[in-house]
Amino acid sequence: MTRVSWLLLPILLMLMLSGCAPRIFGGDTAATAETGGMVLDLPSIILDVDSTGAVSSEQIPLDLIPGLGGITLPEDIVAAFVSNGNQYLQIETHPNGLVLFLDGKPFFGSVFYDDDVLNDLGPVLEVLTASPDDAGDEEAAAEEESEEPDLVATMLPVLRNVGMGVTLRFPVAEGTARRDMPSIRGYQRKTAADMARIKREEQSLRVNEVPIQVAPDGSLSTSNFLVSIMLSQLPPGVGLPESALEGLNERGITSLTLATRPVGLTVGINGNQLPTMLWDSGELDNVLAWGSDSGYLAEKVPELSPQVLGIVVPFLTGSPFNIELILPGG
């Protein structure tokens, strides 16, 4: 039995004894898993988040779960949730992805994946999580890999056989009362058959192929007539921040693609696809409304002003695009 499997035993025991909440997708993982493999269909656990972003649980010692010991959330994000009156962020996994709900409403960040995407995910995560200082240092990377097994590589192959739920419970804003956790049982998740049907329907769509040249200063230009009109309507200076370009370069990211479809957005990094981020059930509208109402977008990302979003969002969600960002030096 692997080290990860041994760690799961006390966790499973405590979850069974702790009176955790049921999951809306409970049973789906076991019902769709291939025979002969290990299947875990866990109940939902509640994690309390305090005003500093520290996370704790009354149900299970988080130090026993790899990656959760001492976990914290950014204090400014917690403050934005609290000031906006948000109390619950629910995260539910199912055999083909995970779904986020903010106070019962689908939230952007919900994703769908299949076996091909999971196979691509390992190399992408290595790129995204690599320290910029170690980029290109193959000897250092090999030494680090030899010292400790790669937890991501260990868990990705069995990800579809693990079902679980997590609810982040935020502090209550002053002058308000704690609400009951909202029910999300009416939500219909997308199955593999649903996504296969959607992909067949997408084959009949006219997809706009859009190369966008990114200059060293982050400014954008394109030979596509429709997109060039859209870019011309944006305020001067809107583009990729130079700091973002530096981060992409330091991590060895040479290719960045965006595929927009009615169902959502799929990002590709160095030829490997990330899970599709869904937006056809109001996820994108809900996160933009949250960003506006909480003031988080105006404070943290002033470039995404209502004027910019009012131009870009309808453009991207209204038509299917395959966008290739041609980075400096690419």
Image (cartoon, helix red, strand yellow):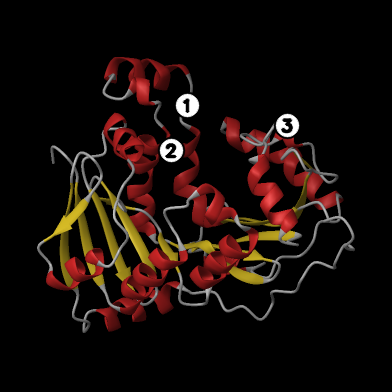
Residue at numbered disc 3? 63
In the displayed structure image, the side of residue 135 where residue 154 appears, left or right = right
Picture quadrant where residue 123 is located:
top left
Which numbered dot is residue 130? none
Residue at numbered disc 2? 153
Discs 1, 3 touching: Cβ within 8 Å: no
Binning the other alpha carbons within 10 Å of mark 3 as few (below 14), some (14 to 19) or many (20 upward) gives few
Residue at left offset 66%, top offset 64%: 102
- Residue at mark 1 to residue at mark 3: CA–CA distance: 19 Å
Quarter of the image for the C terminus: give it: top left
Discs 1, 2 touching: Cβ within 8 Å: yes
Depicted 290 relative to depicted 133: above or below = below
- Residue at mark 2 to residue at mark 3: CA–CA distance: 21 Å
Residue at numbered disc 1? 149
Of residues 165 and 30, which is closer to you in this image?
A: 165
**Percent of width and height locating residue 300:** 53, 47
Q: Nearer the viewer, mark 1 or mark 3?
A: 3
Of residues 215 and 281, which is closer to you in this image?
A: 215
Binning the other alpha carbons within 10 Å of mark 1 as few (below 14), some (14 to 19) or many (20 upward) gives few
Residue at left offset 41%, top offset 77%: 193
**Percent of width and height locating residue 91:** 63, 59
- Residue at mark 1 to residue at mark 2: CA–CA distance: 8 Å
Binning the other alpha carbons within 10 Å of mark 2 as few (below 14), some (14 to 19) or many (20 upward) gives some
Label 2's element? Answer: helix
**Percent of width and height locating residue 38:** 57, 51
For the residue marked with disc 3, what is the amino acid? Asp
Picture quadrant where residue 87 is located:
bottom right
**Percent of width and height locating residue 260:** 31, 68
1 or 3: tag closer to the N-terminus: 3
